Image (cartoon, rainbow, N blue to C red):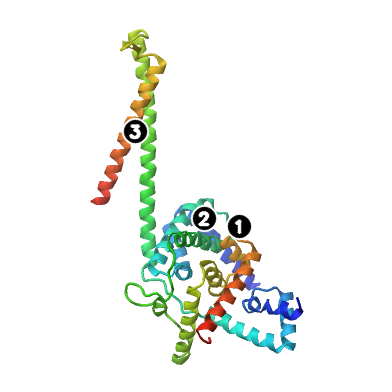
Amino acid sequence: MILAAAMSLEVFTTDREIALLKKGDPDAVSAVIGRYQHRLYRFLVRMVEDPAMAEDLFQQTWIRLLEKIGSYDTRRNFEAWLFAIARNLAIDHLRRRRGISLDEPDDSGQAPVERLAADGPDALEQLLDFERGALLAAAIGELPAIHREVLTLRFEEEMRLEQISEVTGVPLSTVKSRLHRALERLRVRIEREGNL
Amino acid sequence: MTEHELVRAMLALAAAGALGPVEVRRVEQHAQGCELCRRDLETWAVYAQGLRKLPQPSAPEGLVQRTQVRIVQERAEAAGRRRHELFLAALAIFGWAAGWAFWTLARAVTGGNLNLFGANLVSGLTWSLVSTVLVWMTAATAALLLGRRREMRRFL
């Protein structure tokens, strides 16, 4: 009962915020960007593997979203819509520019995996988690964009397959087969490098 | 395809939480009696757990503020573009209206006959052609001037 009330309140708040976004309210814009900044930025980093480009695409995503907010149908899932805009911009960018590897050093000479911040309960576990995570992140970076996106949306954004289907614009069955193929390819790469 | 093969093909998706309850039960039932599938399912579970705990790239400091600034700039540019478009449209309408008014006046003054190099300048067709060329030239000049002004502002 309480949960249902909380959920309905959350939906109400989101609808109200969307109405404010449609009016161009700067506080609402700031609040919504702030709420999604980490998730959206992470998704874009995973997609394009370039923090500077991810930031540019992040900004373009919000500009595009605010341009289209007038025609946004509130029955649609806002999150899926937002990620779909970001995804399309990232795919357009990748089509123009290819061949970026996750463990390719940037201008500072630092590999992207080294720039990532890890968190864990204690130092040793943190280190093990980080090493495992770095290995996985590097392996993900070698996968095609369509596999990277399905893995990050499922495991990091914890989206349901239906939501992933909405973001990527492909049928549910395709999402399932992409997820399966992405996991298989990831495992092959990891096992080639060493055990997880 | 045997049950074992069918279930093996579902193990990765089972660990990813991408199967329905019926398929999950089917995988679990089979894995209970099949050592190979049970171990493989455990391996997939390690992958799934690892994927959920990947090192997280943190959003850079000031990202929200920079995004807001860019939104404001973009809106200002879009408003400027709209103003320019409206100005050009108004200029075109004014050009046509002024042309039509002047044509009416010229016809009234000349009695509908103003010959130059063998062409009647106040005839409908000649006047239309000349005024169209003049309007397009004016619009092009205005667009160039507006563009240069914008470039100048950006430069300053």
Tell which circle, 1 or 2, labels the residue nearer the N-terminal end: 2
Q: Are marks 2 and 3 in contact (CB under 8 Å)?
A: no
Q: Amino acid at mark 3?
A: Ala
In this view, which residue lies farthest toward the right?
B2
- Crowd around label 2: few <14 · some 14–19 · many ≥20 (10 Å): some
Check chain identity for marks 2 and 3: say if they share one. Answer: no
Horizontal and vertical percent for residue A8?
61, 65
Horizontal and vertical percent for residue A133?
48, 82
Which labelled disc corresponds to residue B139?
3
Q: Are marks 3 and 1 in contact (CB under 8 Å)?
A: no
Indicate the secondary structure of the residue bearing disc 3.
helix
A61 in relation to B79, above or below: below
Q: Amino acid at mark 2?
A: Ala
Which residue does the numbered mark 1 point to in the structure image?
A75
Residue at x 40%, y 69% (from the top left corner): A50
Horizontal and vertical percent for residue A92?
47, 59
Which residue does the numbered mark 2 point to in the structure image?
A19
Distance between the alpha carbons at the discs numbered 3 and 1: 45 Å
In this view, which residue lies farthest toward the top?
B111
Distance between the alpha carbons at the discs numbered 1 and 2: 13 Å
Indicate the secondary structure of the residue bearing disc 1.
loop
Residue situated in front as seen by the camera: B54 or A159? B54
A11 in relation to A131, above or below: above
Distance between the alpha carbons at the discs numbered 2 and 3: 39 Å
**Can residue B61 be seen?**
yes
- Crowd around label 1: few <14 · some 14–19 · many ≥20 (10 Å): few
Chain to which the residue tagged by mark 2 belongs: A
Report which quarter residue B73 is drawn in: bottom left
Residue situated in front as seen by the camera: A23 or A67? A67
Chain to which the residue tagged by mark 1 belongs: A
Horizontal and vertical percent for residue A156?
53, 74
